[in-house]
Image (tube, rainbow, N blue to C red):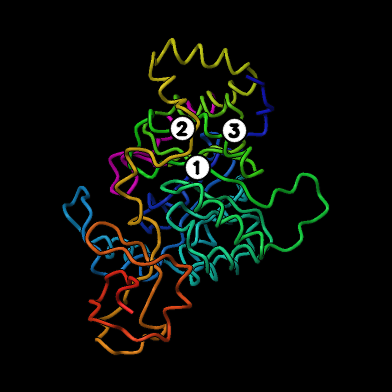
């Protein structure tokens, strides 16, 4: 196994929804991430209507079953909120990174003049969002959870067709993939980390890691040993907090443990790191390394086609009614609703007539038009 240079591993603290929409807590998270060794903090720019339909269903939180749409609605904030996070991050010497989920949030982010942008796994097939963010000409990080090789290839092709000519800087990297498993939390043995080098070879781009496991060491340090140039991990002040991902996020002390482990692995031979981890975790290490073949992980298979984006009816559409662009949206299906067609068909659906009744929220399929 060839040793790779790992000294410049970028470590991202994914703040996610841990701030709960509270500005003071958001800034506390930035400070804690800086003190825990992060290089970058990432937030999510949330507008509920561009993520899912109100009929999506509920999510289990400490306060009980809550409509998922309402959870996202409660997290909506204006540009000043995200601007304050960016200012604080840069004041602490951190790179500011954000994930838009649609064209509205992308517009807000673009006004902030970001140095880079992150696309989450469910949006990897969201053609319009990829085209918009690629047009900015800033480095892009793409999470590849709940995705096939075909989806990744299509995303890279979409970006490549729009991305401006990069500067004549050998260090400039237009696109990086982050291997990911879309399960919360994800079992370590589903991570198949040998796929990192295989994806890099197939697509010719750097491949890092977005880790949804709950442990601070095994998957991140093993990925660092294999040369991952980027490692992203959810970050929270306390796992007892009510954020959507707080139960799998790392608290500051554990995040620092991860950072130290990753930095240490950068100065070691991969075989030595694997030997040390095997002494601690046993056969789980080899299972976590996996086969290197890119497939949907067992824990995310049920999410395929539901977490990814598809075309949904925003309101009831009657038989014979002509479908206008305002009647449809590219949304996550989640648990209750029927998935629809790939976002690539959005332009072809608008203008067609409905062949049958399409209830609000349901995915639109070929048989419907």
Name the residue rendered at 62%, 51% in the picture.
Answer: 90
Tell me whether the residue at label 1 lies in contact with that at label 3, contact meaning CB atoms closer than 8 angstroms. Answer: no
* Magenta stretch, residue numbers: 235-260
Q: Nearer the viewer, mark 1 or mark 3?
A: 3
Q: Which mark is residue 296?
A: none
| Quadrant in which residue 320 is drawn | bottom left
Mark before the other along the chain sequence, 2 or 3: 3
Query: In the image, is residue 251 part of the stretch drawn in magenta?
Result: yes
> Residue 288, how many percent across, how many down?
43, 26
Mark before the other along the chain sequence, 2 or 1: 1
Tell me whether the residue at label 2 lies in contact with that at label 1, contact meaning CB atoms closer than 8 angstroms. Answer: yes
> Residue 87, how many percent across, how many down?
59, 56
Q: Nearer the viewer, residue 7 or 283?
A: 283
Dot 2: element: helix
Name the residue rendered at 51%, 25% in the picture.
Answer: 221
**How far is the residue under mark 1 from the one under mark 3?**
23 Å
Q: Which mark is residue 13?
A: 1
The residue carrying mark 2 is 255
Mark before the other along the chain sequence, 1 or 3: 1
Q: Residues within 10 Å of mark 2 (few under 14, many from 20)?
A: many
Q: Is residue 22 above or below residue 236?
A: below
Q: Residues within 10 Å of mark 3 (few under 14, many from 20)?
A: some
Quarter of the picture containing the C terminus is bottom left
Question: Does residue 342 appear in this view?
Answer: yes
The residue carrying mark 3 is 197
In the image, is 51 to the left or to the right of 110?
left
> Residue 239, how many percent across, how many down?
32, 38
Q: Residues within 10 Å of mark 1 (few under 14, many from 20)?
A: many
Q: Is residue 46 above or below residue 25?
A: below
| Quadrant in which residue 201 is drawn | top right
């Amino acid at each position: 196994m060839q040793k790779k240079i790992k000294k410049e591993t970028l470590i991202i603290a994914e703040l996610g929804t841990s701030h709960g929409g509270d500005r003071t807590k958001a800034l506390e998270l930035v400070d804690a991430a800086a003190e825990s060794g992060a290089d970058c903090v990432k937030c999510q720019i949330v507008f509920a209507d561009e993520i899912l339909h109100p009929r999506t269903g509920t999510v289990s939180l400490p306060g009980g079953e809550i409509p998922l749409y309402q959870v996202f609605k409660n997290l909506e904030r204006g540009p000043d909120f995200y601007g304050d996070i960016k200012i604080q991050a840069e004041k602490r010497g951190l790179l500011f990174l954000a994930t838009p989920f649609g064209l509205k949030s992308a517009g807000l982010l673009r006004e902030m003049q970001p140095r880079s942008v992150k696309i989450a796994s469910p949006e990897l097939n969201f053609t319009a969002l990829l085209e918009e963010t690629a047009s900015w000409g800033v480095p892009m990080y793409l999470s590849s959870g709940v995705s096939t090789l075909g989806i990744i290839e299509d995303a890279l092709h979409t970006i490549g067709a729009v991305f401006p000519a990069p500067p004549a800087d050998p260090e400039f990297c237009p696109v990086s993939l982050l291997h990911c498993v879309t399960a919360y939390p994800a079992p370590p043995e589903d991570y198949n980390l040998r796929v990192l080098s295989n994806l890099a070879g197939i697509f010719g781009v750097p491949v890092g890691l977005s880790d949804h496991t709950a442990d601070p060491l095994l998957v991140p340090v093993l990925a660092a040993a294999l040369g991952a140039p980027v490692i992203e991990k959810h970050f929270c002040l306390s796992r007892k907090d009510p954020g959507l991902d707080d139960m799998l996020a790392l608290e500051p002390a554990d995040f620092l443990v991860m950072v130290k482990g990753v930095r240490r692995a950068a100065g070691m031979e991969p075989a030595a790191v694997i030997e040390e981890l095997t002494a601690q975790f046993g056969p789980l290490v080899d299972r976590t390394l996996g086969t290197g073949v890119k497939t949907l992980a067992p824990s995310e298979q049920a999410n395929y086609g539901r977490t990814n984006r598809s075309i949904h009816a925003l309101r009831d559409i009657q038989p014979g009614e002509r479908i206008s662009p305002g009647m449809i949206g590219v949304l996550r299906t989640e648990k209750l609703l029927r998935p629809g067609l790939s976002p690539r068909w959005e332009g072809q659906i608008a203008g067609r007539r409905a062949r049958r009744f399409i209830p609000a929220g349901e995915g639109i399929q070929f048989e419907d038009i």
